[in-house]
Amino acid sequence: PFLTKLLDPFAVHGMNPENGPANGATKVLFYGRGFYNDMNLVCDFGTGQVTPAVILNRNEFECNSTVSNEIRDFKINFQINQNITTDGINGVYYGYYKQPELFFTTPSKIAIYNNGSNSKIKIHGCGIVEQTDTRCKFNNKITIGDYVLENGKDFIDCEPPGDMGGVKT
């Protein structure tokens, strides 16, 4: 007598995050169904390079994004056991963006005594884009930075936390 086990088909319903820097190495969580520990699963983020998946459970697995020479969205393909290639039924896309490069701050050094003394620091660079969650770190304290476009130049405006107590940054 043979035992037959019916398995859920491999289906990817979504992922998080849906984009990352073109230099790769972003851990991406995929969710759906039909993921099994004995699968040999790899991800192709559209660049032709594959990266191995780590199966977390039947509904989730992770892959690190690969390096891309292009800044655009790619359809992700998955290869199962070296012979089955699929887009996961629903088809998911991963977007690559240019990682911002930070060049300098103005002022370059400031004594911070309280939050009410207009002690904001501007971070200048290239590839800076408006996003909702830009964070600035002052020693071990984190604040939310603001994207600013002023006279054709963009930068991040960071206000230090109010309880720095005279620490130089």
Image (tube, helix red, strand yellow):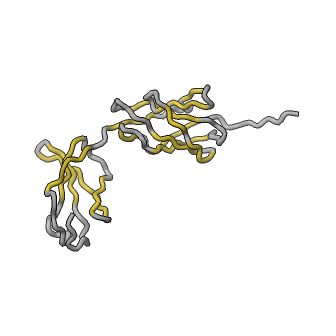
Q: Quadrant of the N terminus?
A: top right
- Of residue 38 and residue 2, the one placed in the foreground of this image is 38
Q: Quadrant of the C terminus?
A: bottom left
In the displayed structure, 116 sits above or below 90; it is: below
Tell me the quarter of the picture where residue 19 sits: top left
Furthest toward the right, the residue is: 1
Relative image position of residue 16 (x, y in whole percent): 46, 45
In the displayed structure, 40 sits above or below 144; it is: above
Q: Is residue 27 left or right of residue 100?
A: right
- Of residue 127 and residue 151, the one placed in the foreground of this image is 127
Relative image position of residue 37 (x, y in whole percent): 65, 42
Q: Is residue 4 left or right of residue 77?
A: right
User: Which residue is pictured at 50% across the width and 36% down the height?
Assistant: 51
User: Which residue is pictured at 39% across the width and 36% down the height?
Assistant: 95
Count of number-bearing discs: 0
In the displayed structure, 3 sits above or below 109; it is: above
User: Which residue is pictured at 20% across the width and 67% down the height?
Assistant: 168
Tell me the quarter of the picture where residue 65 sits: top left
- Of residue 103 and residue 128, the one placed in the foreground of this image is 103
Relative image position of residue 14 (x, y in whole percent): 50, 40
Relative image position of residue 100 (x, y in whole percent): 27, 43
Q: Is residue 5 left or right of residue 73?
A: right
User: Which residue is pictured at 18% across the width and 72% down the height?
Assistant: 113
In the displayed structure, 75 sits above or below 150; it is: above
